[in-house]
Image: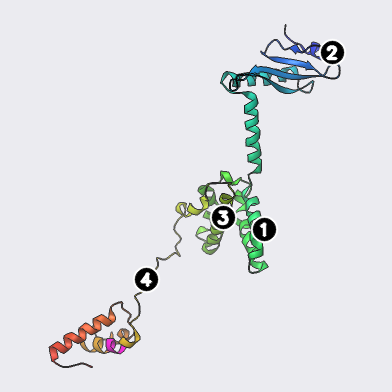
Amino acid sequence: MMLSDAKARKIKPSDKPLADGTVTGLYLFPAGSVGAGKWILRFKSPEMGKRRDMGLGSYPVVSLKDARELALQARKLIEAGRDPLAERDRQLVADRVRLAMPSFEEAARQLHADLAPGFRNQKHAAQWITTLETYVFPVIGKLQVSHLTAADFARVLKPIWLSKQETASRVKQRCDQVMKWCAANDHVVASPASVVAQLLTKQSGKRERVEHHPAVPWRDVPLFVRVSVRHSRLIPGSRQSLAGMKCRHASQCARHAVSRHEAKTGSSSL
């Protein structure tokens, strides 16, 4: 026989549990006063292989209609081979982890608090967090760090990447520092900010590093100048530049030139 609201409202503390009659295993157990009860779904766990009782709330706070909907959802999980009570516990754990996961702003402020005692002065400490407050928090500050990707940091940096290169570089460095702190605290696996430059245009002010040749040893300068100026075939007007020339093998070249000159003239140039 199907349970009705009229019958549920008359349940007494001394009554036996009332079966719903529409959802297998759903019962209304009596509580301490007339018309009060507790919804229980009895089922055999497909994961544990034993009977379990799952509470679905108190009557009349949870109506007969709502209790049936909750029971049907649980039954679908059971048919899929999942224990609805175990599933509820897993969801609670996931919710706790999610709530414990900091947003980028929360992580940044915590890191800043940790770093503050080590800053050279208060002004420098204030600048560190101010750049993030200005350029980062309005865009991704509320997002949990576990959800952030390199594309999110590219979205932050793109508006200033070319127009404010020095500022953008500092913002990138500080974002990376925050995410590495998150990785150290097991909030993320690695910092996505480390590779964000791969998604941005190369800054025009960045120049390739130039490797200069070492200077001629000072003891060899007179020899180098004398031989190069007197015996080379350099075009006129280049003698002044020769005096300041720096070449990795300058002294060797000069000695070879002297040797060739002495062999040709049969006399020493020194």
Give the color scheme: rainbow, by chain, secondary structure or one colour: rainbow
Q: Where, by quadrant of the figure, is residue 39 drawn?
A: top right
Describe residue 116's horizontal placement relative to residue 213 as left or right.
Answer: right
Q: Is residue 233 above or below residue 39?
A: below
The residue located at (66%, 33%) in the rendering is 92
Estimate the x, y position of residue 186 in percent, counting from the top left: 58, 47
The mark found on residue 14 in the picture is: 2
The residue located at (64%, 65%) in the rendering is 118
Q: Secondary structure at mark 1?
A: helix
Quadrant where the C terminus is found in the figure: bottom left
Going by the numbered disc 3, the residue's amino acid type is Cys
Q: Where, by quadrant of the figure, is residue 42 drawn?
A: top right
Report if residue 2 lies within the magenta region: no
Ranked by sequence position, the earlier of labels 3 and 1 is 1
The residue located at (68%, 14%) in the rendering is 25
Report whether residue 237 is seen: no
Q: CA distance from mark 4 to mark 3?
A: 31 Å
Magenta segment boundaries in residue numbering: 221-225
Ranked by sequence position, the earlier of labels 4 and 2 is 2
Q: Secondary structure at mark 4?
A: loop
Q: CA distance from mark 4 to mark 2?
A: 94 Å
Q: CA distance from mark 3 to mark 1?
A: 15 Å
The mark found on residue 113 in the picture is: 1
Estimate the x, y position of residue 219 in percent, counting from the top left: 33, 88
**1 or 4: mark nearer the eye:** 1
Q: Which residue is mark 4?
A: 211
Q: How many marks?
A: 4
Q: Which residue is mark 3?
A: 175
Q: CA distance from mark 1 to mark 4?
A: 41 Å
